[in-house]
Image (tube, grey):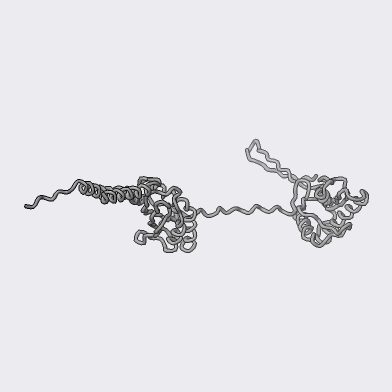
Amino acid sequence: MRIQTALLTTLACAAGFASSACSFIARDTPTYERDTSALLDTRAGQLQACYDDELKRNPDMAGKLTVTFTVEKKSGKITQLAWDKNQTTVSETLATCVITAIDGLALAEPDQRDGVATFSYTFRNNKPGV
Amino acid sequence: MKHPTVTPPSRRIALRLACSAVLALPLLLGACGPRVFESGTAKVIEPSAPPVAVEAPAEEARVEVTDDKIIIREKVQFDFNKATIKPESDDLLAEVAKVMNDNPRLKKIRVEGHASSEGNHDYNVKLSRNRAKAVMDHLVKKGKVDKKRLEYDGYGPDRPIASNDTETGREANRRVEFTILEQEYTVTKKSVDPETGEEKVETEKKAE
């Protein structure tokens, strides 16, 4: 009897834990990606400023930057933000500027799950032949 | 003889519950596992457009010839209650002289003194006349303008260009003006010779 009670309690707690974790918005993957992408777009002006500054130092700078991060469940914050050196061709200064610009963003409506994200940026200076 | 082990009912229930928990728990927690996504399209960042160079508006000339006047966009400064021209107006009057000398077609110009309505009317007429003469003398002596091209007069407060009810208006009325009395101009006539079909252009100088 005592064993049954203990097991029932354990099951109830697990269910309760799981259900509390699931009380936030539940996005499917495409929606999560879309909302996260829109969140990144709010910093488009700052990223353009990063690129403008880089072009002053290096007028021919163009290339790709890949960033990875986790959108933390329940808080919506972007965490573990980093740039993927293997998939990046822009300078470190530009990459660092972008990371700084994105850092601190958070989804207004946190999800019940973490979002493990990878996004790429193409920096294009519209110069012919570059 | 050993009897086979029989699990008592309460124990069987307990085992079933344990199995359910083991099976259910991952399902419950796995339903909140992370979403993993990688955007298929890169976001494009381009430099901001360079600011469009805005041409600075052309400064208005300080002295300008119109159809009937030489307009000055700065005041000739005099000592208070006197006809003495202040040195800070030397540049302006030098420019007026240059315009006159560069435009010999301006045959006759009148230097006019004007005043606000403050003070005695006759006194103001006299002071404005004296000031007009002072300007004319300055143009002749320092600006080397031919004296024959100039005359002067003072009108006191009789020809206001603004209201004398405000200081701004009165200030505007205290002024020197240059009126073109006579100037040469060229009349151009174009005609076509009926025999040859050639266009003929004739110019004629006139003065008024």
> Is residue A18 among what the camera can see?
yes
Residue A104: percent from left, percent from top: 46, 56
Residue A39 in the figure: left or right of residue B179: left
Tell me the residue at 35%/45% (across/down).
Answer: A28
Residue B12 in the figure: left or right of residue A71: left
Q: Residue furthest top?
A: B194
Say which of A96 and B56 sits in front. Answer: A96
Residue A72 in the figure: left or right of residue B156: left
Residue B142: percent from left, percent from top: 81, 61
Tell how many labels.
0
Is residue B45 shown above or below B202? below
Is residue B107 shown above or below B140? above
Tell me the residue at 40%/47% (across/down).
Answer: A24
The C terminus of chain B lies in which quarter of the figure? top right
Q: Residue furthest left?
A: B1
Say which of B208 and B178 sits in front. Answer: B178
Tell me the residue at 10%/50% (across/down).
Answer: B4
Residue B9 in the figure: left or right of residue A83: left
> Is residue B108 among what the camera can see?
no
Q: Residue furthest front?
A: B1
Residue A43: percent from left, percent from top: 47, 53
Say which of A8 and B87 sits in front. Answer: A8
